[in-house]
Structures are given as C-alpha cells and as structure tokens.
Image (cartoon, rainbow, N blue to C red):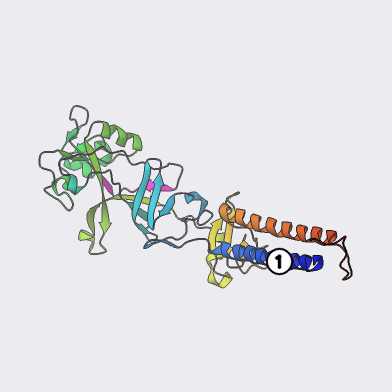
Amino acid sequence: MAISLAKNWTSTLSILTIFLILQFLIITEAQSRICRNSCGDIPIQYPFGIDDGCGSPYYRHILVCTGGQLQLRTPSGRYPVRNLSYSDPHILVTDPLMWNCLDGDNFRPTRPFSLDTSTHFTLSPENDYLFFNCSESDVIVEPKPMFCERFPDQCDSTCDSSSYLCRHMPECPSALRSSSCCSYYPKATESLRLMLKHCASYTSVYWRNLGSTPAFDQAPEYGIRVDFDIPVTTRCLQCQDTAKGGGTCGFDTETQDFMCLCDKGNSTTYCNDRTSSHRRGVVAGTATAVSVAGAFGIGAGVWYLKKLRAKAPVTHGVQTNENRLF
C-alpha cells in the first residue's frame, strides 16, 4: 500500500509540476501582448500606454483606462479624454467643473486646470479661456484695441470684454443674460489661479479644424486641447518595423530602459534580432510576481518530490509490519 501511495504522490506532483511549467510559459508568452491598444473607442498607440511598461516612459502613468473610459491624469485631477489624435498630436479633454451651457448664470465652484511641467505636455495656443463676472477692481476688463491682434504681447494683462467668443458663445449664444464675460489666455497655471480668485467661473474653448477652406477651417467647441510630443528613436522604429518582427515599443518598469515587446519575449533591440538576448521577464510588475510565484512553485514541487522519494521504504514488493500505514 505504501508503494501505491508513493506512486500516487509521485504522479500527482509530476502533474502539478507540468501544470506549473505550462502556466509559467503561458505567462511569459503573454507578456508581449500585455499592451492594450484601445480604451473604449479611443486607440492607444506609441508614445502612450495604459499598461505599465508600454509606450514611452515620458508618459508613464499619464493615461488611465477605467471602465472603458480614458482619463488624463494631471496635478489638478483626472479629466475624461474626448479624443486623441496622433497625426496632429493632441489630446482633447473635458473638465466637468468648468462652466457649460446648462449652467447659464448659475456658476459652480471650479478649480484651475494644470499640467505637470516635467512632462512633454503643453497647453495648446488654440485654446481660449472665457471668464465670467470678474471683479473690475482686481482684473483689467476692457475691449482690446485693434493693434492687439498684431502685437498681442502688449495686451497680455487685459481680459477682452469684446472678444468674438463672448459675443458668440459656442452652442448657446443666449446662455448668459445678466453676467459679464471676457477672454484671457493665461500663460501659466498661477495666472489662471489668480484670475479665478476674482472671477465667478471660467471655461475653455478650443478651435477644432474642419478640414475645409482656409477662411472657414475652424469652429469653436468646449474643451481643453493639450498638445504632446512623440519621441521618435531609431530603436523604436526598428522595433515597430514589420520586416524586423513588428514588435511594440515599451520599457523596463524597473530601469525604464527601452524594451521591444515581441510575441516570443522581450528584446533590447528588435524581435528578429538573433544576436539580442530575448528576455522572458515581464514588463508589468504584477505579472512578474505571478511568474516568480510559478517558478517558486515548480522548485518547491521538485524539492518535495525528491524528499518523498528519499524517505520511501524499499520493500521489493513485500508488505511487512514495519512499512504498514494502517
């Protein structure tokens, strides 16, 4: 009976070992496919990534995909992403706390939108900011003279009360009845914060390209346009080259060094480079923990199997009182 039990243990541990090895291989093979290429209906491409280790480290932890909705993370909060363009690199976000047409003359508490200056993001010059019910004793609210169009730097301190957008509010020209409006472009978050100390609320309007004739090629819409850079490197181009294996550009989460994510593992150059050692290590830290756990399980199983075999009594098929279990 002891022989039979030992054989059963041996068989069970062998099956467990094979299962753990297969799980380990499945995990490492799936590591190169860990980068999701969309969030909802918004495509996610280089230089961005919504999984850690994907895209460029310059934009690490910047985009968040929650419940199929893409959000931009900044020091002032998280903002829903309406659109993301790679041909004309920019992100369009909305701020639920900004004024909108439904608010009318009812102004809600808001906060200034800000960007991390250490990132490769910039507020687009195609944004216009409208401020409502500003204190004229603290803010210079007056119509800008004509020469400001040619020399805007000489009129920076003025909040233009006769701007086109104040006279033609996008989507709701009659939303404001008893409130004042002026247009001002803050060049820094601090100037925006100071403006909001003396104004009831504000909103952002960007100019969307219509792709039509030059004279009528833009239309105002509510939202914040954030421009970004696409860092192009030779290694990333080689990694993405279909003739070289068609990998995905990523980085090591510990060192932030470049990593080409391939179907058969991760390479430091490109997928078809036979001289480059293909790493089986995962990009994201969570999957690394699973891989280490799998490897530990395999080692423990093999160790226990050897120990069991060493202690198994040698009976040569003879059942005696010394080796009986029951």
What's the residue type where badge 1 is placed? Thr
The percent position of residue 172, horizontal first and vertical second, equals: 15, 51
Name the quadrant of the N terminus. Answer: bottom right
Q: Quadrant of residue 189?
A: top left
Residue 289: horizontal and vertical position, in percent?
61, 53
Front in this rendered view, residue 185 or 177: 177
* Residue that numbered label 1 is attached to: 12
Residue at position x 43%, y 60% in the image: 44
Can residue 251 be seen by looking at this rendering? yes
Q: Residue furthest top?
A: 137
Magenta stretch, main secondary structure class: loop
Q: Which residues are magenta?
A: 104-130
Using residue 324 as the reference point, say whether residue 119 is left or right of it: left
- Number of numbered tags placed on the structure image: 1
Q: Looking at this view, is 238 or 306 the one in front? A: 306
Residue at screen point 26% across, 53% down: 207
Question: Within the magenta stretch, is there residue 302?
Answer: no
Asked whether, in this view, residue 63 is left or right of residue 268, the answer is left
Please, is residue 8 above or below residue 257 in the view?
below
- 118 within the magenta span: yes
| Residue 158, percent from left and from top | 22, 35
The quadrant in which the C terminus is found is: bottom right
Q: Quadrant of residue 303?
A: bottom right
- Name the residue located 26 percent from the left edge and 31 percent from the top edge: 197
Q: Secondary structure at mark 1?
A: helix
Provide residue 108's location: percent of width, then percent of height.
Answer: 23, 39
Left or right: residue 128 versus residue 278 is left
Location of residue 218 with respect to 159 vertically, above or below: below
